[in-house]
Amino acid sequence: MKRILILGCLLLATAWSHAQTFTLKSKDVGGQATNKQVFNGFGCTGENVSPQLSWENAPADTKSFAITMYDPDAPTGSGFWHWVVFNLPANTTELKTGAGDAAKGLLPPGAIQSVTDFGQPGYGGPCPPQGHGLHTYLITVYALKTPVLQGLDKTTMPALVGFNIHFNTLAKASIVMYYQR
């Protein structure tokens, strides 16, 4: 009887821990990027609209969030940063479709979109070289242990933002989309 009780407790604890997984979701993104997310420039003719994102079950001690979109398949030797957002308040659990366009004002106060590898702040959608094959676009939300990433602004290069995110990450969750042309 004691063994059954212990086994039952272990199963409950396992089920509870799985139910509390930090998770990122999107109503806009499935496995493939659509023309809505694709960049408009460099030979691409998409709408360049950032996807809706929502997340749940962040660690209780989360003080802020950051979001990145990165293409590790870009032929640069270092990948390509398509979107970098940080200093999202800890009570944020969603970004609406189009939040990557600063002119729309859809980000919470204090949030910063820094420069991407396109050379400007904000969302820059997929646009791999013609005929280069399928590219991976990794969208990640980071739960951070600090309320703000100090000393960074919209002109900060993605690698420096990534360095600061790395050393302040409590947990992270990702979704992947693919695109080729």
Image (tube, rainbow, N blue to C red):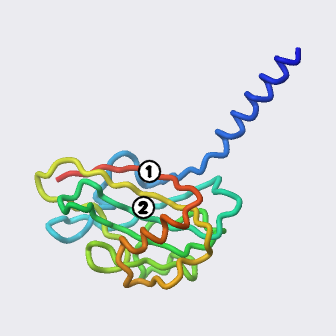
Q: Is residue 52 visible?
A: yes
| Up/down of 152 relative to 68, above or below | below
Q: Is residue 96 visible?
A: no
The residue type indicated by label 2 comes to Pro
Residue nearest the viewer, comparing 98 with 23: 23
Numbered disc 1: secondary structure: strand
Instruction: Please name the residue that numbered disc 2 is placed on.
Output: 51
Relative image position of residue 16 (x, y in whole percent): 72, 38
Looking at this view, name the residue that lies furthest to the top: 1
Residue nearest the viewer, comparing 148 with 119: 148
Of the numbered discs in the image, which one, if any, rests on residue 64?
Answer: none
Q: Quadrant of the N terminus?
A: top right
What residue appears at the point 38 percent right and 81 percent down from the top-left corner? 156
Numbered disc in front, either 2 or 1? 1
Looking at this view, name the residue that lies furthest to the right: 1
Instruction: Please name the residue that numbered disc 1 is placed on.
Output: 175
What residue appears at the point 42 percent right and 68 percent down from the top-left corner? 162
The residue type indicated by label 1 comes to Ile
Relative image position of residue 69 (x, y in whole percent): 38, 62
| Up/down of 176 relative to 46, above or below | above
Q: Earlier in the sequence, mark 2 or mark 1?
A: 2
